[in-house]
Image (cartoon, helix red, strand yellow):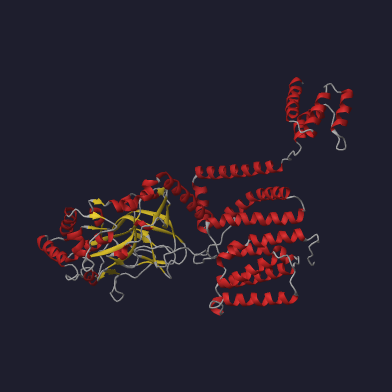
Amino acid sequence: MRYSPNSHSTKELKLLDLAYLTVLPPILLITKLPMLIFMATVVYLIYRDKRLSDKAILGMTLWGLVAIAISMFGSFNFAGLSRLKVFVELIMYLLILAVSLQRLTKEINFYQIISPILLLAISLFFFHTLPMLIYVIFEIFVLLWIILAYRMQSSIEESLKMTGMLFLLSLPWVILLFIFFPRISFEHASYGFKNEEVAKEGYDGKMYANEKAVGLLSDRIVFEVGFNSGKIPPSSKLYFRGSVLYIKKGKEWKPMPIGVLRRYRPARYVTPNRYDYIKDIVSYRVSLYPTKKRWIYLLDLPIEAPTGAVIDSDFSVTLKGGVNEPVIYDAGSALEYKYGRGTLKNVLDVALGADSKMAPRCAKLGAKIAKKYKSASQRVKAILKFFLDQNLMYSLRPKGLDPKNTTDSFLFDVKQGYCVHFADSFALLCRFAKVPSRVVTGYKAKPKNSVKNYLAVKEKDAHAWVEVYIDNSWVRVDPTATAKKMDTLSMNIINQTDTIKDKASKINLYLLYIKYKVEAWILYYSHFRQMQLYENIKNSPRFALVFVSTLIVLFGIFVLFYLYLKKERCTDKALCILAPLLKRLEKEGYKKETFESISSFFNRYSKDGEIDIKSIDRLYHECKYKESKDACYKLKNEIKRIKKSV
């Protein structure tokens, strides 16, 4: 059917134009510049409301194909086509081209009517975020409304009302199918594509004992943790392990060289021969945002890595390919542990490596401590006492540090620095005192950023600490804890969101907690989560009762809203006021016929009825036709009086 401005199809075509624009936002987020230009031109031509010639349509077709070719350049090959993302991207571009050409030709056909729904389905492949979930629900509602408005040919109010009723009727079944429909467990599969996230930074892989270490002070969340036990460990146990560093070269700390022989090969699970004992094992679920690096963070001491990740000899956990998109993983850790008996001598030799030229005064002090104390534990205690006696200050902006020798400058002169300076100087001083040591980087979470079993870890929680080798085991020491005080600038930077708007921060934390629960149980509702839910229902009568009661209450709310929408609305004010009286008279046997006017009905009733209806008739007509507020008020009171007197 061709379009003409006066044809009956104008309304239908405009509804389809609206559908076309409704699905644009998610597509625009992933569409490249040539396709954006093509789509912008199509929208402009559509709203010029003028049919294009056949040559112009052919030109737009060729332009669209060229735009697709440019947009797909570099990824469109046989290897790339085997990837689902590239395949779906190609199909999406072809679908956009087809729909655009159909809109430009102003033709209605079956494909064009269902094309918005197909575009919606494609958009689901690319996003797994809470805002997108809300948007998709809204988009489905709009598309359903457009289809009903097209079919019903009714007013906007009526079509919206019908859409709401159908939506409410479908929700209980959608919820039941979502919860109980069997999910296929693909342990290594990852279907669907997520939007690009801003990569979060952190101390990872390397550590700089200079100004490069600063800049990690934002409140952006790096990862979120949900503890399965419901109880968050104490602050002293909230160390999330990242990279372990052995070599200091200049101002930079680096991991163990690849060529050094290690006793244990990286594996997903930690075998019993790798530790003396482990206690207080906790299981938890982590949502880690992209870091563009291979390290993932687990509580000290990790004993079980997520699928696709391994734990190396230093108990660092790495993910093959790196964290390039949001990753959700389950893991286990021991809060109490002792390990290190199997550490090879060549590893300990590397952990003792230190050049006295890097920190001459530190080297001199270390040699003095080594000579005075025989055991490693005594030497470490002496070093801790020295740190305490120095009255070191925690400062994110230490002034006057010598860039050529930051270790000695921090420890003996300026006495101001942040965690990397504490960890750097402590590790070197231990080495000069003949105690093997290494630097561990990761995050030190704060209990104040927690709600119930949920914990948020932010960029400004990035931290560095030291592990020393004492009595055949690696022992964690946090030298930053020896700082006597914090300078005002650092205190303001670290606590800016807490001191200025405590309540707002707490509300935001609860919102993050809700977001985390929604993502865990809706966006990432997997076979594992489904089995976990079944186990909870089976083993806990209380949980089963709460779960069933919640479903009943939720379905009851849907039914109430449905009945509310279904209820007939009275559009005639005067007739609405009169409705209770008409019902009362109907019970007496006097029913108003559809063809009867109010006056005719009242005249018929007045012949045999017991109620004096003349005043009611007069007030009704004054309320309806004269729009007299006083008459409407008197009519309402008169009807109330009659109902009470009967």
Whether 30 is drawn above or below 147: the answer is below
Note whether residue 314 is visible: no
Residue 134: where, in percent of width, then height?
57, 54
Whether 482 is drawn above or below 125: the answer is above
In the image, taking residue 367 as reference, residue 290 lies left or right, namely: right
For residue 573, which quarter of the picture?
top right
The residue that appears at 74% across and 29% down in the rendered structure is 632
Task: Name the residue furthest left.
Answer: 372
Quick one: 594 or 180, which is closer to the camera? 594
In the image, taking residue 36 as reference, residue 223 lies left or right, namely: left
Residue 303: where, in percent of width, then height?
36, 60
User: Is the C terminus in the top left, top right, bottom left or bottom right quadrant?
Assistant: top right
Residue 103: where, in percent of width, then height?
71, 67
Task: Please count the marks in the image.
Answer: 0
For residue 462, which quarter of the picture?
bottom left
Quick one: 473 or 323, which is closer to the camera? 323
Note whether residue 348 is visible: yes
